[in-house]
Each structure stands twice: as C-alpha cells, then as structure tokens.
Image (cartoon, helix red, strand yellow):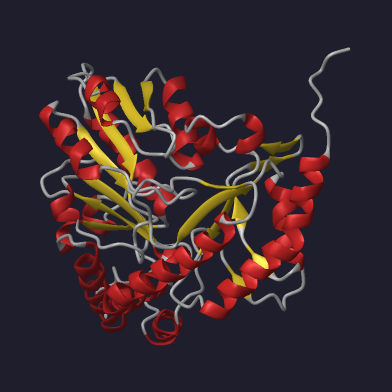
Amino acid sequence: MSSTATVYLDHNATTRPVPEAVAAMVQALQQDWANPSSTHGPGQDARRLLAHARGRVAAFLGCSVAELVFTSGATEANHMAVLGAVKASGRDRDRVLMSAVEHPGLQALAQRLQGEGVKVDLIPVDAQGRLSLAAARSLIADNVALVSVMGANNETGVLMPVAEVAALARAAGARMHVDATQLAGKAALGFAASGADLMSFSAHKLGGPKGVGALVVRKGLALPPLLSGRQERVRRGGTENVPGIAGFAAACDRAAATLPADIEHMGALRRRLEDALSALPGVHVYGREAERLCNTLCLRFGSLDAEQVLMKLQRAGIVASSGAACSAGGTQPSHVLLAMGESELNAKAGVRLSLGPETTAAEIDATIAAATEHLLPLLAQAEAQPVSLGVS
C-alpha cells in the first residue's frame, strides 16, 4: 500500500501524536535538555518540568503524584508489576492468576514465570469475551501472589470487571494488577476507585510518544524495582525520558479536555460501522453482547483469513489489523478468539477495526464501501466452494 492511504483504523495499536505532545517534546529537547538529577540550574529546570508533567499525568490517571512511576512503556510497567509482586510475596504465595485473553507480552511473561517455578492459572472468558467471575472466585486463594487482568481487551474491546476482581483479590490478601493500556483516551480512568494495587499505561495509545509509559503503585505497597537506581523514588532506575514524559503529559491534558466528546464521537461512528458491516452476509461481530470500548470493532467475514481481508482493505486505502499472529510458518490463530471458544479457522479470521478521535464519518463510509465492494465477492466465492469432509 502506498503512503497515500488516509483511513487509519488501527488506533489500538498506536495513535498519531497529538500536536500538543509534539510541541511539548520539541520544547523539552531544545530548552530543558539537561539531566533532571543534576543540581545546577539547567538540571533543576528539567527537574521542574518533570515534576509539572508528573502532576498532570497523575491527575489524568486518577492517582497521587507519589504513586506514579514513569517507565519506557506498558510492557516494562507490566513486568515491573508482575515480577515485583511475585518477588515481594512470601513463599506461601506461589501462584499468579491472569485472564486467558491477556496481551501476548504478559502471556510470554507467564511462560517465563512458569519456567522459574511459579504456577500461573488462567481465568477463562465466555463466548462474548467476558471474564468469568465465578471462575475467578474459585481460583483466587490464599496462595495467590498476584491477579493480573487487563482493563479492556486489545482485540475485542471487551471491558473486564476490574473492581469486582480486585475485591476478590483483596479478600484473599493477593495483589491486583490492571493493564489499563487500552482504557486511556477511550474510557474514564480512576486508579483510586478501581481497587487495583498496580496499573500500567503507555503514552502512545492516547496521542503521546512511543517509548514512555507509567506504572501506578498504590501508596504503601513495597515493590522491588525491575531496574535499580535512585530515580523515580528508587523504584525505577535510569535517567528519566524528560521529552517523552512532557509529551505524555500534553497528551493527557488533551485527552482530559476532550474525553467525553471523544467517547461519544467514536461510539457513534463505531455503531454506524458495526451496523453496516454486520448486515453483510456471513459477518460475525465478537463481543457484541458485552460492554466494550467505544472505538473497537472485532469481526470476521465468514471464515476468510484475516490477512486476505486486510490485504483487500489495504489496497482500498483502509488500514486495520488482526488478532492473529504471523510467523514464518504462517498465520497463527488469535489466542483471544480461541479462549472465546472459536475454532482455529475462525480464530485466524478475526479483524480489528479501531477508531480514534479524529476518525470521520466520511472515513467510516469509505470503509463500509470498500468492504462491500471488495469482500462480498470473496464471501460469495468462499460460500460457493464445496467443503471437504476428508472422506476418501
């Protein structure tokens, strides 16, 4: 696809930095470039900028300034939360619980923990992608160190019952971590009211720069650092990314000012897109009966492979993504859709369309037209092909 494509529907993967974030970063690079740990004048200027940015990010995330730890992104924040909570727990707490639909980064971390002797159990979801509270209730026991549940699924947009799970974890004496990466800029946030002990974020999901994120650590919780050093109240070593943090704060300011209108705007356009595409023959929408993010639509066109669908849309100038993972051996089915009970064939067919605040009605209409023109013939062709039963 050429660079002239204008319809970007992959905001859950990353967002365009908002102008305010770019301007803040440029100013920090040009004027406040000194090390904020230095005691001289330029260093203290950078330190004041860092402190001001910290306050704005904390206000947006609904936590106190002292609870906020800047990281390189949500992946580092997730590792810091999970590994730190496990290390801080006693020997009697040797289990970690995660939802079955966590981000691949956390799934890889779970495999690492298992290799180190930590038992990891997965909390199942139903056919709509909703977390089973009954299963969570039966799994959370006094030998659990940490429960980690994402705030909203990155593929389906389905919201998870964070407060309810946090209450179960608290009653069992376990810590609760929420990967809130997909919530920022798409839903109201409130760390203090969530009941979570730890919460992860990434700036580039809400119009900030890549390479910067945050972990919120509830006041009074002792968490061993992943990176040793005296920065971030001795909780995360390394010179702070002042330009990135400045951009993060500017993006938070923008999101805070526009969030109610953004939610209404993206929700209306998502519904318009969903209604039109679900009317096409063979289209199935995932999580339709569940509470979802305002901007996220996950669906399949019959059992057409997602890569085939995305290629057709891409040629028509529509940028989207799939939940299926690509490897040298081909496309692997989405673990999220498998956890929802889908077959491997259908789990390779899931396509995610994720909107942003700048998405327009004209772009949604262009997407509907492209799907109708380019995918309907493929669906008809697939339906006309005889199904092999494997009988010789």
Left or right: where does residue 206 sit relative to residue 302?
Answer: left
Q: Residue furthest top?
A: 392
Residue 54, given in percent of the width and then of the height, sits at 24, 69
Residue plotted at (20% across, 35% down): 175
Q: Quadrant of residue 362?
A: bottom right
Q: Quick check: 139 left or right of 334?
A: left
Extreme-right residue of the structure: 392
Whether residue 123 is visible: yes
Q: Quadrant of residue 40?
A: bottom left
Residue 219 left/right relative to 285: left
Residue 334 sits in quarter = top right
Picture mark count: 0
Q: Quadrant of the N terminus?
A: bottom right
User: In x, y percent, where is residue 73?
Assistant: 42, 56
Q: Tell me if 331 is positioned left or right of 15 in this view.
A: right
Q: Which residue is drawn at the image coordinates 36% and 82% (left, top)? A: 32
In what quadrant of the picture does the C terminus appear? top right
Depth check, front residue: 170 or 48:
170
Q: Residue at x 51, y 40 (%)?
A: 104
Q: Is residue 226 visible?
A: no
Q: Measured along the vertical axis of the image, is residue 285 above or below residue 272?
A: above
Q: Nearer the viewer, residue 66 or 275?
A: 275
Coordinates of residue 16 in the picture (x, y in percent): 51, 73
